[in-house]
């Protein structure tokens, strides 16, 4: 049996995204008889230790310190302190467990902690997963040089899109890089009730027979451009409404925008919805939209495809790996609400095109984006890294 230490800034039960879902889905599918996983993550309001799935989760930091979400801009000190706390905890755990490999989820705060560990225990293989969706050009000067060291020091890098491979090389990565995308729990998102929807949720949301529900899911941050969807409602009939799932620093701005445009009765903020509950919200909706300014990959898109609703997106980052315009979705222009409205109208009016897109997208997701396949590919990267480092 091998033992792997994971560094991840955020993990369950807190607000999570595609990166954290990936950790859980992958580790759940690798037998503890093959690999035992430990993790170091930020404490927040959660126990210092607990077993979650196939992972022993160790949380560092003070329980009341750092209750901001990953997207918070208000209190970054808790994230900075995670680096030394995680490094010291890793040293302590390594003395007891002698890890065969360390795995960092993303190259930010978790990556810095993993870098320090690698510098001290240079014989331990270091696998870096790149799932970043933004902040590609913001690091400068000495901070850029230190950040680049994470890429230069890794023994193997796994990226979820071609775009992120290019970015990793730009950051100085010299090691082997493998593209392994994120996936979707196809059985969960493509359930039998997809077409009929959930009647009780329809009633709760007040959806009428003539209503067309647009839905967007994910963090409410600038790069997800939810404000452009809100603006697009001005160019669409009143029966077209928007369902927003997620939290983030843009929430207050978006609510103010909705009020200023006098469309309060057409927009619903549902807040944080557990991942397991997401499918039923997709089932009662008609079109998924996220007009991203940047995107590493975008789990939300393939989840919507699996759920059987058409997707509108922008041709940025890793989205182009799976969305072919007119085949598996529609592209709208970046920062262009009128373009969003035009694509929505096309999907509403052109039933034949809509059904064609939905059919192709669901088939693609089923064939290419299953977690069982992805977990197997990640496991191969782990073993390859362990064999290649003396």
Image (cartoon, rainbow, N blue to C red):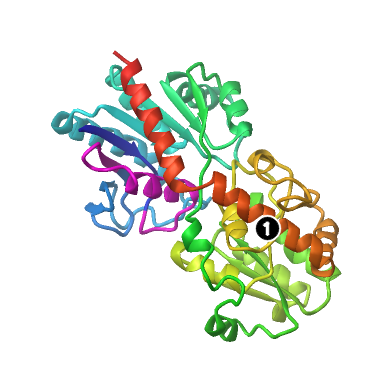
Q: Is residue 3 magenta?
A: no
Residue 125 visible in the picture:
no
Q: Residues within 10 Å of mark 1 (few under 14, many from 20)?
A: some
At x 41% / y 41%, what residue is drawn?
Answer: 375
Left or right, 197 with reference to 31: right
Q: Nearer the viewer, residue 246 or 100?
A: 100
In the image, 274 versus 69, the foreground residue is: 274
Instruction: Say if 151 sits above or below 262 in the image.
Output: above
**In the figure, 172 relative to 251: above or below?**
above
Number of marks in the rendered image: 1
Range of magenta residues: 12-39
Decide whether residue 24 is among the magenta residues: yes
Relative side of 241 to 350, left or right: left
Q: Residue at x 55, y 51 (%)?
A: 366
Q: Position of residue 373 (x, y in %)?
A: 45, 42
Q: Is residue 152 visible?
A: yes
Q: Is residue 380 left or right of residue 342?
A: left
Give the structural element (helix, strand or loop) at label 1: helix
Image spot of residue 119 (x, y percent): 33, 20
Q: Which residue is mark 1?
A: 359
């Amino acid at each position: 049996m091998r033992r792997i230490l994971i560094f991840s800034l955020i993990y369950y039960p807190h607000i999570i995204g595609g990166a954290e879902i990936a950790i859980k889905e992958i580790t759940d599918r690798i037998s503890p008889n093959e690999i035992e996983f430990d993790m170091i993550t930020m404490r927040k309001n959660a126990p210092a230790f607990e077993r979650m799935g196939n992972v022993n989760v160790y949380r560092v930091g003070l329980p009341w310190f750092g209750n901001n979400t990953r997207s918070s801009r208000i209190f970054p000190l808790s994230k900075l302190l995670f680096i030394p706390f995680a490094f010291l905890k890793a040293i302590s755990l390594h003395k007891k467990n002698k890890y065969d490999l360390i795995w960092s989820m993303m190259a930010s705060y978790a990556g810095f902690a993993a870098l320090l560990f690698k510098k001290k225990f240079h014989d331990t293989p270091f696998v870096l997963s790149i799932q970043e969706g933004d902040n590609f050009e913001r690091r400068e000067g000495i901070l850029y040089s230190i950040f680049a060291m994470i890429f230069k020091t890794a023994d193997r890098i796994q990226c979820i899109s071609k775009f992120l491979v290019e970015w990793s090389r730009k950051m100085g990565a010299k090691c082997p890089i493998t593209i392994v995308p994120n996936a979707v729990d196809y059985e969960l998102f493509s359930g039998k009730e997809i077409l009929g929807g959930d009647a009780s949720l329809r009633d709760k949301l007040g959806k009428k027979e003539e209503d067309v529900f647009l839905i967007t899911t994910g963090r409410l941050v600038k790069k997800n451009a939810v404000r452009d969807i809100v603006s697009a409602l001005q160019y669409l009939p009143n029966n077209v409404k928007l369902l927003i799932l997620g939290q983030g620093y843009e929430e207050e701005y978006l609510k103010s925008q909705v009020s200023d445009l006098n469309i309060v009765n057409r927009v619903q903020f549902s807040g944080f919805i557990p991942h397991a509950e997401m499918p039923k919200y997709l089932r009662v909706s008609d079109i998924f939209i996220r007009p991203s300014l940047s995107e590493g990959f975008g789990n939300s898109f393939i989840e919507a495809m699996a759920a059987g609703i058409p997707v509108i997106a922008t041709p940025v980052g890793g989205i182009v790996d799976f969305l072919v315009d007119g085949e598996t979705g529609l592209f709208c222009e970046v920062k262009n609400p009128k373009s969003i409205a035009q694509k929505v109208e096309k999907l509403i009016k052109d039933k034949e095109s809509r059904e064609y897109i939905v059919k192709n997208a669901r088939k693609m997701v089923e064939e290419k984006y299953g977690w069982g396949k992805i977990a197997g590919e990640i496991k191969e990267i782990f073993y390859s890294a362990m064999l290649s480092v003396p």
